[in-house]
Amino acid sequence: MSLPPDYHMHTPLCRHASGEPTEYAAQALSVGLTEIGFTDHSPMRRDDFDNWRMRFDQLGEYIEKIEKARKDNGRLKIKIGLEVDYLPGHEDWIRELAAFHKWDYFIGSVHYISETWAVDNPEQISKWKERDAFEVWTIYFDRLRMAAETGFFEIIGHADLPKKFRIVPKQDCRPLFEKFLDAAKKTGVAIELNTAGLRKDCKEIYPSRAFLELAFARKIPITFGSDAHATLEVGADFKAAIELARTVGYTGFVKFEQRRRSESSL
Ligand code: ZN
Ligand code: FE
Ligand code: FE
Ligand code: ZN
């Protein structure tokens, strides 16, 4: 039984990851993966938007690093994409990024719930104290729904990211999840099982089992990703993620090549 591809991995160009793509690829082979995909944080129209992504003039270097990883690791299938931040108003920019290269897929992620606050940024954790948790989650999932509706993305990243620091509303959040999932169903976008959550305060895969059950009920397709920011994180906790997917009822996952989807069994 072969492992599903690790479709969410970063590079040092984003300024908060270590290890070259060719090293990630070698690690992938050593843990038994047959396919991976790089999805580093995409540039913004303004390079000074924040300090945790590549500059626009580094996109060519990004592509070259991945081509080197392919050359050095011939047995491994290596896809190329981006983890693109969705913010309302950035649609034209995302179209420009899409036209820049023959990408295999885009992961659409919401980190920002305003122009300046990324809810998962540890440097901005104090902002959570100024806001009501349910209000933050509501804005986040509304933006995630909008991201799904754009049709720009093959995969939606770490869908319940606001749980990262364990700041969870007392209210029932399932209606928020369902509005997003209904939109995802309409546009056919997949969600990922992202094992980085296991390495954060929430100690849980993104998304939660309860969330994934709602996704499975709607037959939303899935992918798997470690969200590796270091070589040894490639393929991390895939056994746990596969177990979660199977026990919820999933019997397959999806793959992408030049934005075309195919199905594989799990
Ligand atoms: Zn990152
Ligand atoms: Fe992310
Ligand atoms: Fe990521
Ligand atoms: Zn991420």
Image (spheres, grey):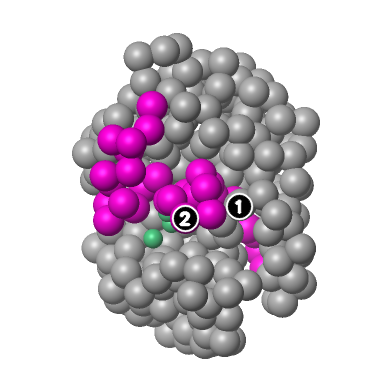
Residue name at image x 59 percent, y 38 percent: 144
From this view, report whether residue 60 is shown above or below residue 76: below
Task: From the top left corner, tell me how far across and down residue 114 is, in percent.
Answer: 52, 48
Amino acid on which the number 1 mark rests in the picture:
Tyr
Label 1's element? loop
Please say whether residue 200 is visible from this viewpoint: yes
The quarter in which the N terminus is drawn is top left
What number is the disc on residue 86?
Answer: 1
Task: From the top left corner, tell me how far across and down residue 25 is, in percent.
Answer: 39, 71
Magenta stretch bounds: 103-132
Residue name at image x 61 percent, y 47 percent: 155
Task: From the top left corner, tell me how far across and down residue 29 is, in percent.
Answer: 36, 66
| Residue sitting farthest toward the front | 130
Amino acid on which the number 2 mark rests in the picture:
Thr
The residues tagged by marks 2 and 1 sit, at their Cα atoms, a distance apart of 13 Å
Identify the residue under disc 2.
116
Label 2 crowd (10 A; few <14 / some 14-19 / many >=20): few
What number is the disc on residue 232?
Answer: none
- For the image, the number of numbered tags is 2
Query: Is residue 256 shown left or right of residue 110?
Result: right
From this view, report whether residue 157 is shown above or below residue 168: below
Label pair 2/1, CB-CB below 8 angstroms: no
Label 2's element? loop
Task: From the top left corner, tell me how far across and down residue 203 is, in percent.
Answer: 24, 35
